[in-house]
Image (cartoon, rainbow, N blue to C red):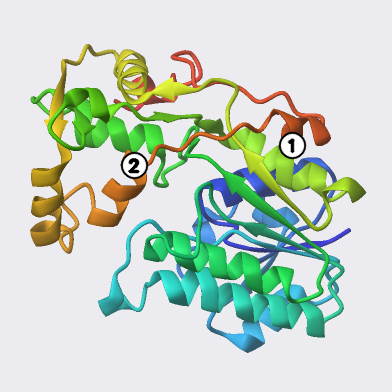
Amino acid sequence: MRAAIFGGTGFVGSYLVDALVEAGHEPSLLVRPGSEQKVRHADRCRLVPGGVDDATAIASTLENCDVAIYLVGILREKPSAGITFRSLQFDGARRVIEAAKANGVRRFLLMSANGVRQDGTPYQRTKFEAERYLAESDLPGTIFRPAVIFGDPRGRMEFGTQLRDEMIRLPLPAPAFFSGLSPSRGSFSMTPVFVEDVASAFSRSLYSDSAVDRTLELGGSEELSWREIIRRVAAASGRRKLIVPVPVAPVRLAAALLERFDFFPLSRDELTMLMAGNSVASRRDFELLGIQPAAMTVERLSYLRTRA
């Protein structure tokens, strides 16, 4: 079985390439020019230069493939560089879905996200629209909705590393955001999921008929409060961190003014999604694939200490 991967040089993509190569596959990867050095096991992969706006490159990537896997996603837009949620998370997915149908691909795996909805943020909305487009395409597919993903970033953006660099390392207390007037309303939680478990879910779903035409929700084995996540990231980084309640309203105002600059850590939409929490009960879906999901323990976050 040959799988075509779109987004194979990204965080999750690098682990999925590992999993597929280990299982004996020869992945076909669409690779943006200049990103060739990011490819894992390049000698075991077929590389096609191009982007998800290039119909010819998409078709070449899909040639002789049984499965198409779309992982492309971003957390922040850069419209001046043509990097938008719509262009990458919906338009790109739509092009690949149509090309997969035209090239006789038999399965389509789509990376979505927990909490996506039609009336959500642009990130959530474009992910939701891609899900709906796949569901209406008549192409046998599986949609994956992971919670926030953690693991050794291998030089990419990753949840734990981002918290360490943007909160734990700063000589300021870490914020426990809350809405309204009372800090008691700042209680939100997450079920961070280990990147290797996400990659295994994609890989194993290829051999599971039960995963066809299903949406699989992926979360870690433990639900953690925001305060506990900060404590664990700090401990794994070899530090102790004071945590203080911070009202989200002034932070949202600052984001409105500064989110267009790379130095500002959060956009208004990211704040909205953060305050909504990111928890998912995924035991049934992981059991379907024979996976026991890991928790975000201090030990499993040890990569933060080695790079701190």
The image position of residue 213, as x and y in percent, is 80, 58
Mark positioned earlier in the residue sequence (2 or 1)? 2
Q: Which residue is mark 1?
A: 285
Q: Which residue is mark 2?
A: 274
Helix, strand, or loop for circle 2? helix
Q: Residues within 10 Å of mark 2 (few under 14, many from 20)?
A: some
> In the image as oriented, which residue stretches furthest toward the front?
181
Please report the residue visible at 81 percent of the width from the left and 42 percent of the height from the top: 204
In this view of the protein, which residue sits in the foreground, 26 or 88?
Answer: 88
Quick one: quadrant of the N terminus?
bottom right
Please report the residue visible at 30 percent of the width from the left and 33 percent of the height from the top: 163
Q: Residues within 10 Å of mark 1 (few under 14, many from 20)?
A: some
Please report the residue visible at 21 percent of the width from the left and 33 percent of the height from the top: 178
The image position of residue 146, as x and y in percent, is 57, 43
In this view of the protein, which residue sits in the foreground, 221 or 207?
Answer: 221
* Amino acid on which the number 1 mark rests in the picture: Asp
